[in-house]
Structure formats: structure tokens, C-alpha cells
């Protein structure tokens, strides 16, 4: 399982541990990933995803999973999220 957010594409970053003596050793900063089930209003079901805490706040801020996916760039989304986005777009087109 990769350490990458399915909605925002955020992954591990690198940096240095800096000691009191100013010695520098490489380290990794991992994203704060959580396993959540997000509900889609237009599809009427839930989807299990592994997303960051920041992405979860963004989904709430934008008004749910459907609104977030419709506004998100395809290059940032995972394959699973892209599939869900296409389903949402189909259902929204059918409703209109």
C-alpha cells in the first residue's frame, strides 16, 4: 500500500534531522493518512479511501465527495478516485 493520498496526491517528503551539534541526517516526513469511508450523494453509496487529514477537511469544506471530485484535477487523483469521478459525472448528467 503506497503512502499517497488518493484525493490530493500528497506523498512522503524528505528532509534532515538536525542535532544540537548541527549534524544532519536524512529523514522522511510521511503524510497523515487515514482510512475513511466517504459517502457520495449522487451515487447513494460509500467509498473506502486512504486520504490525508487535510484532504478530509477539504472534502468537508467543498461540500462533500461529489463536489470535491468534480473540482479536482485528474492528475492529482488516484485511479480509484478517477473511476468514482466518472461515475459521479455520469449520474449528474443523467439527472440534468
Image (spheres, rainbow, N blue to C red):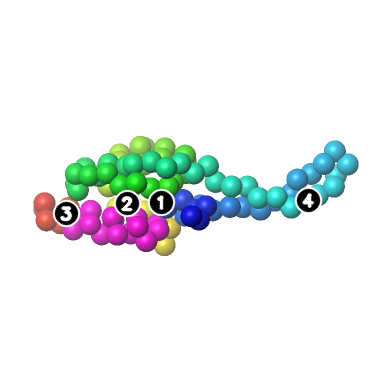
Mark 2 touches mark 1? (CB < 8 Å): yes
Q: Main secondary structure of the magenta part?
A: helix
Identify the disc placed on residue 7: 1
Give above or below for 14 relative to 55. below
As measured in the structure, the alpha-carbon distance from the residue carrying label 2 to the one carrying label 1 is 8 Å
Residue occupied by mark 3: 91
- Dot 2 crowding, Cα within 10 Å, few <14, some 14–19, many 20+: many
The residue lying toward the viewer, choosing from 55 and 34, is: 34
Q: Quadrant of residue 75?
A: bottom left
Label located before the other in sequence (3 or 4) = 4
Above-or-below relation of 58 to 69: above
Determine crowd level at label 3: few under 14, some 14-19, many 20+ residues with C-alpha closer than 10 A: few
Under tag 1, what secondary structure?
A: loop
Residue segment shown in magenta: 77-90
Real-space Cα separation, disc 2 to disc 4, in angstroms: 39 Å
Question: In the drawing, does residue 91 fall left or right of residue 53?
Answer: left
Which residue matches tag 2?
A: 69
Mark 1 is surrounded, within 10 Å at the Cα level, by few (under 14), some (14 to 19) or many (20 or more) other residues, namely many
Q: Which mark is residue 76?
A: none
Q: Residue 87 in magenta?
A: yes
Dots 1, 3 in contact, CB < 8 A: no
Disc 4 + disc 1, Cβ < 8 Å: no
Q: CA distance from mark 1 to mark 3?
A: 20 Å
Name the residue: 59% across, 47% down. 30
- Of residues 10 and 3, the one nearer the viewer is 3
Label 4 sits on residue: 25
Q: Residue at x 34, y 55 (%)?
A: 81
At 38% across and 41% down in the image, what residue appears? 36
Upstream in the sequence, badge 2 or badge 1?
1
Magenta run includes residue 20: no
| Lower sequence index among marks 4 and 1 | 1
| Residue 80 shown left or right of residue 51 in the figure | left
Amino acid at each position: 500500500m503506497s503512502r499517497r493520498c488518493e484525493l490530493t496526491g500528497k506523498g512522503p517528503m524528505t528532509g534532515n534531522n538536525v542535532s544540537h551539534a548541527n549534524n544532519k541526517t536524512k529523514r522522511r516526513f510521511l503524510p497523515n493518512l487515514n482510512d475513511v469511508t466517504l459517502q457520495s450523494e449522487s451515487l447513494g453509496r460509500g467509498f473506502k479511501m486512504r486520504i490525508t487529514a487535510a484532504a478530509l477537511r477539504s472534502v468537508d469544506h467543498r461540500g462533500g465527495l461529489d463536489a470535491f471530485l468534480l473540482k479536482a484535477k485528474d492528475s492529482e487523483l488516484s485511479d480509484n478516485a478517477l473511476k468514482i469521478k466518472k461515475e459521479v459525472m455520469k449520474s449528474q448528467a443523467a439527472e440534468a
